[in-house]
């Protein structure tokens, strides 16, 4: 649309206002001609997408909206597909060009809303719609979230397993941006790339007790890389129970169990003896087994040696995949509370082991302190995620590199300007 008709419209409105007298308006509630309904900006803008009915856009190409500087400028552009995914974009300083900076999805329908302003400052609007074509390749990057739906302890990380390896940093950013985690109550958290095919998500601190965590993927249809497109992912919903944290102190030979920050039990224990020290650090309960047959050969102890063993074990709560448990150890009751004599597990009498077994669930936290062992591995032997400090955890995200950490709530309130 040319500027001339809009200029005539402004002049006409002014004449009407004068004829009707002071305090009476014809073009808007405040008498300002710029408050009139937005004009149709169709002739003002140029759009890179298809305009012919039935023609589909190539999702490999960026979206672009431009306007002739002599006719005004673009003030805002929003582009969203049928599933609610927004396209990121950048607007030039002079308002002459907007272009997408995130990939379009394939086989999707987009609605683009463009806001403009003419040389007189009058607002214009245009809504455009188009479809994107299907990708030529059938290779898909599917995502599987974990753990299974259910209720867990506050230490349980969320996991995402990819069907194909992603090494490129830009591609990782596309994937990570599409994986959404929302919790109620809300907490700060971020994904961390464990390897090319696995990500873990955790908050800065443990999840709140009785929280609801929802996980979903917006990756389907998005181009990830050359001949690789986002595939399906089943959404996940988990909840947390009470905040249960057990601290096993190898120096005092006691385990103290806290529920919602209140001590509920103190149990005499024994941990790993010299040469078989229990790992230090935060561990997350992986599962519970009422009966396990434990053999020394499973941890590298040769059969027939002085350290070999083959024992029936009850009330076994697993904390590492390599064989660390909290379990009943009736054979070492005399040393529990005074000495460390196990081969790496946390042993206690049968009554206490039964109590612990009944009062914990997957995802609850067992923190081991004051052993001479090394610190629990972050990955590969269970969930040692909490042994990575927050700065390093954020550095494992493809989106957080160089991004400042969000302030704590109390800091945010301090930094917020005071109303005048």
Image (tube, rainbow, N blue to C red):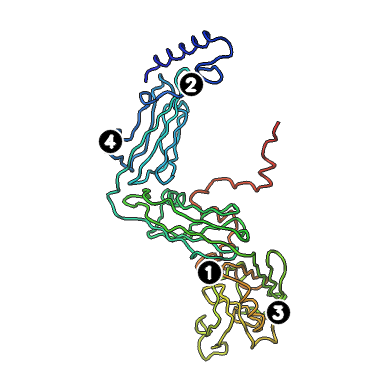
Q: CA distance from mark 3 to mark 4?
A: 76 Å
Question: Which mark is on residue 268?
Answer: 3
Residue 368 in percent (x, y) is at: 64, 71
Question: Which mark is on residue 382?
Answer: 1
On screen, residue 87 above or below 127:
below
Tell me which residue sits at (28%, 52%) in the image: 137
Nearer to me, 265 or 374? 265
In front: label 3 or label 4: 4
Mark positioned earlier in the residue sequence (4 or 2): 2
Nearer to me, 320 or 142? 142
Would you say residue 273 is visible in this rendering? no
Q: Can you say which quadrant of the picture contains the N terminus?
A: top left
Q: CA distance from mark 4 to mark 2?
A: 31 Å
Residue 109 falls in image quadrant: top left
Residue 165 falls in image quadrant: bottom left
Label 2 sits on residue: 36
Tell me which residue sits at (40%, 25%) in the image: 41
Q: CA distance from mark 3 to mark 2?
A: 79 Å
Residue 174 in percent (x, y) is at: 43, 49
Would you say residue 88 is visible in this rendering? yes
The reply to whether discs 1 and 4 touch (Cβ–Cβ < 8 Å) is no
In front: label 1 or label 4: 4
Q: CA distance from mark 1 to mark 3?
A: 25 Å
Question: Which mark is on residue 53?
Answer: 4
Residue 71 falls in image quadrant: top left
Q: Is residue 4 left or right of residue 56?
A: right
Q: Is residue 346 left or right of residue 133?
A: right
């Amino acid at each position: 649309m040319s500027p001339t008709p809009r200029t005539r419209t402004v002049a006409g409105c002014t004449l009407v206002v004068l004829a009707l007298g002071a305090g009476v308006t014809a073009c808007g509630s405040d008498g300002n001609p710029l408050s009139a309904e937005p004009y149709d900006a169709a002739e003002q803008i140029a759009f890179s997408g298809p305009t012919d009915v039935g023609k589909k856009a190539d999702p490999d190409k960026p979206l672009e909206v431009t306007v002739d500087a002599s006719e005004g400028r673009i003030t805002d552009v929003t582009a969203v597909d049928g599933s609610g995914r927004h396209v990121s974009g950048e607007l030039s300083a002079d308002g002459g060009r907007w272009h997408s900076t995130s990939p379009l999805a394939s086989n999707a329908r987009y609605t683009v809303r463009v806001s403009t302003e003419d040389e007189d400052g009058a607002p214009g609007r245009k809504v455009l719609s188009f479809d994107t074509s299907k990708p030529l390749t059938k290779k898909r990057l599917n995502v599987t979230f974990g753990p299974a739906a259910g209720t867990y302890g506050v230490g349980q990380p969320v996991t995402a397993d990819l069907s194909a390896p992603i090494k490129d940093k830009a591609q990782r950013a596309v994937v990570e941006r599409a994986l959404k985690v929302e919790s109620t109550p809300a907490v700060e958290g971020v994904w961390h790339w464990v390897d090319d095919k696995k990500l873990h998500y955790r908050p800065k601190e443990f999840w709140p007790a009785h929280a609801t965590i929802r996980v979903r993927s917006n990756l389907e249809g998005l181009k990830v890389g050359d001949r690789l497109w986002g595939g399906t992912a089943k959404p996940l919903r988990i909840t947390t129970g009470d905040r249960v944290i057990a601290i096993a102190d190898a120096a005092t030979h006691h385990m103290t169990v806290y529920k919602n920050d209140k001590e509920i039990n103190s149990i005499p224990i024994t941990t790993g003896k010299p040469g078989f020290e229990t790992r230090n650090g935060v561990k997350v309960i992986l599962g519970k087994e009422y009966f396990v047959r434990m053999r020394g050969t499973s941890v590298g102890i040769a059969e027939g040696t002085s350290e070999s063993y083959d024992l029936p074990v009850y009330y076994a709560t697993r904390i590492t995949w390599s064989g660390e448990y909290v379990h009943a150890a009736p054979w070492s009751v005399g040393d529990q509370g005074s000495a460390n004599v196990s081969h790496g597990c946390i042993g206690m009498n049968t009554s206490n082991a039964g109590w612990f077994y009944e009062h914990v669930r997957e995802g609850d936290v067992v923190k081991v302190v004051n052993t001479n062992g090394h610190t629990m591995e972050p990955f590969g032997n269970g969930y040692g995620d909490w042994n990575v400090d927050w700065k390093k955890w954020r550095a494992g995200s493809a989106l957080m590199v160089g991004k400042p950490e969000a302030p704590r709530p109390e800091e945010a309130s301090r930094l917020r300007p005071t109303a005048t």
